[in-house]
Every structure is written in C-alpha cells, then in structure tokens.
Amino acid sequence: MSVIEKVEHLVPEITEWRHRIHQHPETAFEEHNTADLVAEKLESFGLEVHRGLGRTGVVGTLRAGGGNRAIGLRADLDALDLQEMNDFAHKSRIDGKMHACGHDGHTAMLLGAAKHLSETKNFDGIVHFIFQPAEENVAGGREMIKDGLFEKFPVESVFGLHNMPGLEVGKIAMRTGPFMAAADFFHARIVGNGGHGAFPHLATDPVVIAAAIVQAWQSLVSRNTDPMKSAVISVTQIHGGHTTNVIPNEVELSGTTRSFEPAVQDMIESGMKRIAEGIAAAHGARAEFTYDRRYASLINSPDETVMAAEAAAHVVGADNVDTNATAVMGAEDFAWMLRERPGCYVFLGNGAGEGSCHVHNPGYDFNDKAIATGVSYWTRLVEQILPAA
C-alpha cells in the first residue's frame, strides 16, 4: 500500500479541520482560537504540547522508539487582512480577514501528519511539529527563534512547505540554495519647506525631491547590481500634502526590496540611504531613512534538499518532482529557521489551469485535493530520516 493510500482515510477529517480554520481566520499574533484548535488536536493524538513561543505559537512533540535524533516540521497559522470574495460554505466569517495564502491547509496537513504518525509510530526518534504564528509581514518565525525555539526543542534539521497555485496537484518543487528572496522594508521622510502652490520658488518642494529619489533608486537595480544577480526595489506608498494649492512640508516614501545575496542586500540598503540623503541635500532639504531587514533569504541546504526530494519522489514519483525549480522573489520567514538549522522548503502543487487562483487574492482557496499529497510527504520524510529500528 502506498503512503497516500495509507493516509487517504484521514482526508475527510483533515478537510473539516481546514474548513473550520478557513471560516475563522486570525491575523498575526492573534491566532488564539487557531492555536487552541491545534493544541486540542495534538493533545488528543497523545503528543506533548507546548504553547507561547512567538506569543501564539504551538509545538507538539511526538516520540517513537528509543532514538534521540530529532527533526522539526513547520506550518504557519495566520491569515491576511483581506475581504474574501468567495461564496462557498466554508468562506470566512470574519469581515476583512481571510486565509488567502493557504496557511489553513498547511496547518491542517501538519495536524494530519501528526495524527497519522501518532497512530503508526513507524519511526525511531523525535518529531517536533512547529505551528508558527505571524508569517505574513511580521516574521513570527524570527520571534519563535528569539524565544528559544531550537534551544527548547533541539533538532538536527527542519522542514517546511507552501502550496503553489500554477503547479499541478501531485507535483512537488524545490531547489538547493537560495529559493525565496530576502524581504526588507524601507521608509523615507523627505522634509522640505512648504508654501503656496503658485509660488514654488519660495518653497523647498519635497514632492519634486521625492520623485527624484524614487527614480534614482531604480539605478541601484539597473546600474549597481550584477546583471547575473537579482534585486527589486518597489516604492509602494507615497504620502504628502492635504490640498491642491499647498506645497507640503514633507513627503513620506515606503516600500519593499527583494534580493537573494547578502552583498546585494548590503548594497541596496547603503545605496538607498546615500541617494535619499544626497538628493535631498542637493535640493536644500533633509531625508530621514530607515531600513528593516525583516525576512532573510530562504536558502535550502544541499543534503536536506536531497532528503526532501527522495521523500517527495517516494510519494508522487520522480517524474513529478522538480529539483531545479525557479527561485521566486516572494519571501518566507521560515528562512530564519533555516539560518539556525539545515533544512529544506518545498512547493506543493495547488492546481494549474483555469480557476487556479494565486495566493493573496480575494478569490483564492486552498485545494483540498492536495491534502493527501502533503500529509504523505510529511509522513514519508519522517519515516525516511528517522527509520524505525
């Protein structure tokens, strides 16, 4: 019997958990009800349950055999501030909040793996099931690390996954090395001297200065970044002024940058600051610049990527495993865990073709047809890395 056939009987129950979580989305560090559900289920499976890391995080520990080797499996708990536009029965019941990234599916699949492994215990060692809060924008993974995740729950390696719309159900993708980008966030305050819109010569116009800065920042990508490497600088917010005939005193710029390599990241931060302050000074104004390195680049370690590929091939067949998937500019705070321990992050097919809505869209929904594959992948990974004696 294949691994998928062994877990198939659990899929209806796991689907019910997923729909319940989807109906009650909770955003960063507010995942109290979701954490309660996770803890309740883990306890019912006989796992040791620990709460409070990263505020609302949950860790369930399962032991089998007499081995002391330990690995970690991680899922994310949080939803997004987004109004759901679907009309199915399990749509969000919370106005303005929605599971638009599939974390409900990730959590449900990891719970399913915990249930199956607690029943079979076909491994020798320790598995820590890590349910992390606040993946979206706030880097809850970093907060769990700060709270001593791997000191309290030592592991030799750690693994994660994310659903991927556009990739067919039954396929799994990964790559060794940088797989997802570092996500940094910046804010610049351009302080000039306001005045009447009809007399710009009597003012120091921060709007014109801000426009020059936005344009100049793009030269860091086009002229300061090695063409064989990647960088993105996106100004996503410009705020200034309150009426049409007044030049404001100040303008604020905010946005995000993406890169894969620390040297590129360093260049972007120092270059943006230099350009903002220099252009502002050249116009007789002042620039205040801050830069937040919130998400590290996600880098899969070689040995663990081989392990993940072997487990995936066992579940879906080698022809359905892509071990040279294209790296993406999206970010993932599982990167902070990979900075502490070797491991691998994979993409799980969520469906391709017409109707396969991408994440962070009000029409998105996790594909329940992917549940059996995800649970089977987790199960095989554990049994492969921690083989029963």
Image: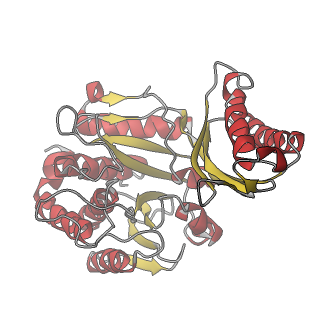
Of residue 332 and residue 317, the one placed in the foreground of this image is: 332
**Residue 3 x, y percent position in the rendering:** 21, 47
As displayed, is residue 148 above or below residue 277? below
Exactly how many numbered labels are in the figure?
0
Q: Judge left or right: residue 206 versus residue 385.
A: right
- Residue in the image at 27% along x and 29% along y: 320
Q: Nearer the viewer, residue 106 or 380?
A: 106
Q: Position of residue 145 (x, y in %)?
A: 61, 65
The answer to whether residue 121 is seen in the rendering is no
Where residue 248 sits, quadrant-wise, is: bottom right
Asked whether residue 255 is in view, the answer is yes
Instruction: Specify the quadrant that holds the N terminus.
Output: top left
- Counting from the top left corner in percent of width and height, residue 12 is at 11, 61
For this rendering, which residue is in front, 382 or 177? Answer: 177
Tell me the quadrant of the picture where the C terminus can be found.
bottom left
For this orientation, the residue located farthest to the front is 198
Q: Residue at x 21, y 68 (%)?
A: 17
**Rendered image coloring scheme:** secondary structure
| Residue lying at 13% horizontally and 48% vertically, measured from the top left | 5
The residue lying toward the viewer, choosing from 244 and 343, is 244
Left or right of residue 237: residue 210: right
Above-or-below relation of 361 to 349: below
Measuring 17% from the left and 54% from the top, which residue is drawn there?
A: 7
State the residue lying farthest toward the top: 227
Give x and y (percent) for residue 156.
56, 54
